[in-house]
Amino acid sequence: MIRNSRSSKKRADTGDSESALLVKLINKDIERLKYSYKTGKNMPKERIPKEYVVKYGVENLWKLNLSSFWRMIYTVRGSKVEVISILLEVLDHKKYGRKFGYKTS
């Protein structure tokens, strides 16, 4: 799993309410992904950061808005028999904008 969600889980377990909310949102949307990997928005190939291609071998990328501030990034792998969604990263809006080359104010 990802570093951001692990650290959020630890902080949530110690009473951090923002982290608890983030963990709740992540878990809810992971459940949604179990039913349809198309829950999120498919990202254009030219927007896939090289970091993801090198580190994870990503060929496709999907984004799911957890809230107005947080984004969950995942990729889909599999065959006709089995589709696997792999959660790569959870980013706040500003980090998401920087990583994917969007202008942020």
Image (cartoon, grey):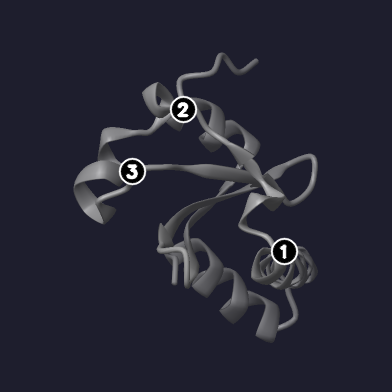
- Which dot marks residue 29? 1
- In the rendered image, residue 56, in percent from the top left (x then y), is placed at 27, 55
Q: Quadrant of the N terminus?
A: bottom left
Q: In the rendered view of the protein, which quadrant contains the C terminus? A: top right
User: Disc number at residue 59?
Assistant: 3
Q: Residue furthest left?
A: 54
Q: Earlier in the sequence, mark 2 or mark 1?
A: 1
**Is label 3 in contact with label 2 (beta carbons under 8 Å)?**
no
Residue at image position (47%, 64%) is 80
SS label for mark 3:
loop
Residue kind at label 3, given as amino acid type: Glu
State the CA–CA distance, disc 1 to disc 3.
Answer: 22 Å
Q: CA distance from mark 3 to mark 2?
A: 15 Å
- According to the picture, the residue beneath numbered tag 2 turns out to be 100
Looking at the rendered structure, the number of numbered marks drawn on it comes to 3
Residue 67's disc number: none
Asked whether the beta carbons under mark 1 and mark 3 sit within 8 Å of each other, the answer is no
Direction bottom: furthest residue: 13
Q: Amino acid at mark 2?
A: Phe
Q: Is residue 90 left or right of residue 18?
A: left
Please state if 34 lies on the left or on the right of 49 as rendered.
Answer: right
Mark nearer the viewer, 2 or 1? 1
Residue pictured at 38% horizontal, 33% vertical: 48
Other-residue count near label 2 (Cα within 10 Å), few / some / many at <14 / 14–19 / ≥20: few
Sequence-wise, which precedes: disc 3 or disc 2? 3
* Mark nearer the viewer, 1 or 3: 3
Amino acid residing under circle 1? Asp
Residue at figure coordinates x 26%, y 34% from the top left: 50
Upstream in sequence: badge 1 or badge 3: 1
Q: Residue 62, how many percent across, how many down?
A: 54, 44
Along the viewing direction, whichever of 31 and 4 lies nearer the viewer: 31
Q: Position of residue 24 (x, y in %)?
A: 77, 71
